[in-house]
Amino acid sequence: MVYGLFMLGTYFCSAILIHLIYHRMNANNIDFESKHYVLYTLNNQLHIEWIIRSLVVCYWLQGKSISITIIDEGSSDDTLAIIGLLSRHHLLDVRHMDDDAPQPQTPRHNETPSIHIRLSQPEDLLKLPQVHSLW
């Protein structure tokens, strides 16, 4: 019994140590590996949740950071309600096309480039990593 607890404690401490070393070694590379997606929505309630969740999981599995800006172009369905629920769990920047907030612009030299995707255009969906890997 004591031997089993000792083995389990050793395994647990080793796992924590490996994770701490890995995060410390990769702390300088996080900005380099981050991505910024700008999603333009217009009545996309059927697939907006899948797109956001799969983007977050895809980059989480790769150990990369991601930021998502969602610009609604006047949806009349439940797109905004779904985005509101998702923004409680994920860091989302939600804007409306008629807002006075500045729209995403071309990044400066040292900033992460934005990937702009209009969800109503099927050819733009190929810019998503999870869709691109299916083809």
Image (spheres, helix red, strand yellow):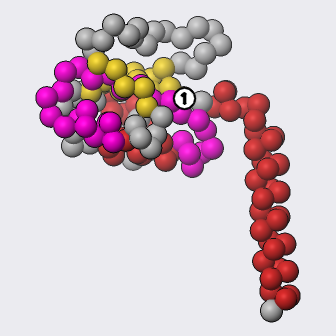
Check residue 80 for magenta coloring. yes
State the residue position of label 1.
35
User: Depth check: 129 or 55 in front?
Assistant: 55
User: Depth check: 83 or 111 in front?
Assistant: 83
Q: Residues within 10 Å of mark 1 (few under 14, many from 20)?
A: some
Q: Is residue 21 above or below residue 129?
A: below
**134 on left or right of 19:** left
Looking at the rendering, the stretch of residues picked out in magenta corresponds to 59-85
Q: Where residue 49 sits in the image (x, y, percent)?
A: 32, 43
* Image quadrant in which the N terminus is located: bottom right
> Which residue lies at the image location 83% right of the left edge and 57% below the top edge?
17
Looking at numbered disc 1 in the image, what kind of residue is underneath it?
Lys
Check residue 95 for magenta coloring. no
Q: Quadrant of residue 108?
A: top right
Please identify the residue farthest to the bottom as the structure is shown. 1
**6 on left or right of 58:** right
